[in-house]
Image (tube, rainbow, N blue to C red):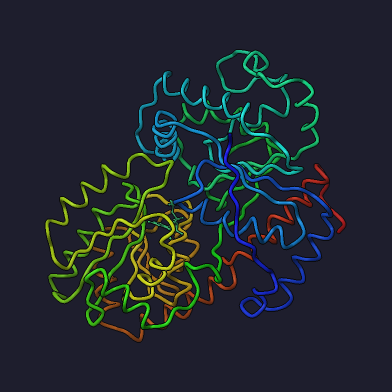
Amino acid sequence: MIQTVTSPELALADYEPVVGEWPIEEIRRLARALGQVSVQHVNSTAVGGGVAEILVRLVPLMKDAGLNAGWNIIKGGDDFYRVTKAFHNALHGANQPLTSADLAVFERYQTMNRDLVQVWGDYVVVHDPQPLGLIEVRDARSAPGGDGKPAARRLSRSKEAARIVSGTRWIWRCHIDISAPDPHLWAFLAPWIERYDASIFSMPEFARPLAIPQFMITPAIDPLSEKNVELEPAEVQAVLLRHGIDPSRPVLTQISRFDRLKDPLGVIKVYRLVKKRRPDCQLVLAGGGATDDPEGAQVLSEVMEAANDDPDLHVLLLPPFSDREINALQRGSTVILQKSLKEGFGLTVTEALWKGKPVVGGAVGGIRLQILDGVTGFLARSIEGAAERVRRLLGNPALAEELGRRGREHVRSHFLITRNLRNYLLLMLALRGPGKDVIHI
Ligand code: UDP
């Protein structure tokens, strides 16, 4: 059976002290205007990575706002995740050859999941490419996919099921930077995407020529989650000590899945450059895997080799649900790095900024929305550039503190989950009146 993720109970009222009364009242009014609707999120993993991180908090908050919200995970095997990880890289513009056998694997799992996933939402929000083909349950008549075969032949759902879900509004939420995708893969996926009622991207730069409306909504973090709540200094210190990290010396940290696009090897080079002038500094590279990311083990072994038994370089393989531990590692750091080569948004940056930490991030994707260079952190375009900025921060604690303070306020204004929830409600209201320029609420 398909997995339904159960989430904790959350109350919108608890967010008032963080964001103020009015944003919460606005959410309630928008939810009332929507009425008794159900919202079904579908993605490919319950654990690891930014999408799961958002949904585990967004779904319960949607419920507290009065919506019937839920979250289902599609099924995949190793072959599927190998292909979808290759898709992920190719959509990010990497030179990643894809064979027709790969595309066939993807299609096979789309067909399988169409039979497994029951569509129950008035609004179905499909996250990223992995479950994209679920859209075929809405209408068995038109053909997607680019292979020329009528879709109906591939569908095993009954006409009755297709009729029941025909009033559903379908939203494709893309979390990745698809500004320069592999053209063949894009041509394969676009016919599915264009059958949705709307798409969501994290930045205007990610928009594509598409025949459906494109909404820009940035992801967000939950300030009250275990990942982000305030911690006592003693707890932070205990976590550092448990991992052999010296809290009295500078700590540089990158938290990320072990993924080449997060550039962990580049981070090690940055650290080595910094260490030439600041021999006291330490590096923490902490991350786990995501169940839909099969490349992690290989990248981790490359990282271990590059670490080369340096006692000040701590590679931490974290089990799932290490939220409090990650929170403590971020809070215990002197500078946070997120040296990604490509990035949809980079929730790790948001998390660090919210904790008032100075962040040096790669000047890519959504990191550029969060780090206003020199104002809420530093952007870097090279290893040398990143090392120079880390050194500057280590040498100027007052600057580090000021950037961190502004970073936290930037997150409060733009990247908290209450704003994300409000955007979803507005989008759902907008989809009630397709083609209308003005929707009366
Ligand atoms: N994360 C985690 N454990 C890990 C590595 C990352 O919980 O071992 C979390 C991290 O704190 C962040 C999310 O997973 O909340 C990663 O989101 P991001 O947008 O930075 O990157 P993605 O993995 O989605 O590419």
Count of marks overlaid on the render:
0
Front residue of this view, candidates 181 and 59: 59
- Residue 387 percent coordinates (x, y): 24, 67
Q: In the shown orientation, is residue 386 left or right of residue 87? A: left
The N terminus - image quarter: top right
Q: In the shown orientation, is residue 341 left or right of residue 430? A: left
User: Quadrant for ligand 1?
Assistant: bottom left
Q: Residue furthest bottom?
A: 398
Q: In the picture shown, does residue 106 fall above or below 6?
A: above
Quarter of the image for residue 58 reads bottom right
Quarter of the image for residue 78 reads top left
Q: Residue furthest front?
A: 1
Q: Residue furthest right?
A: 440
- At 81% from the left edge and 65% from the top edge, which residue is drawn? 29
The C terminus - image quarter: bottom right
Front residue of this view, candidates 357 and 40: 40
Q: In the shown orientation, is residue 80 left or right of residue 251? A: right
Q: In the picture shown, does residue 60 fall above or below 301?
A: below
- Residue 64 percent coordinates (x, y): 72, 62
Q: In the picture shown, does residue 339 fall above or below 153?
A: below
- At 41% from the left edge and 47% from the top edge, which residue is drawn? 290
- At 56% from the left edge and 44% from the top edge, which residue is drawn? 174
Q: In the picture shown, does residue 18 fall above or below 351?
A: below
- Residue 77 percent coordinates (x, y): 44, 31
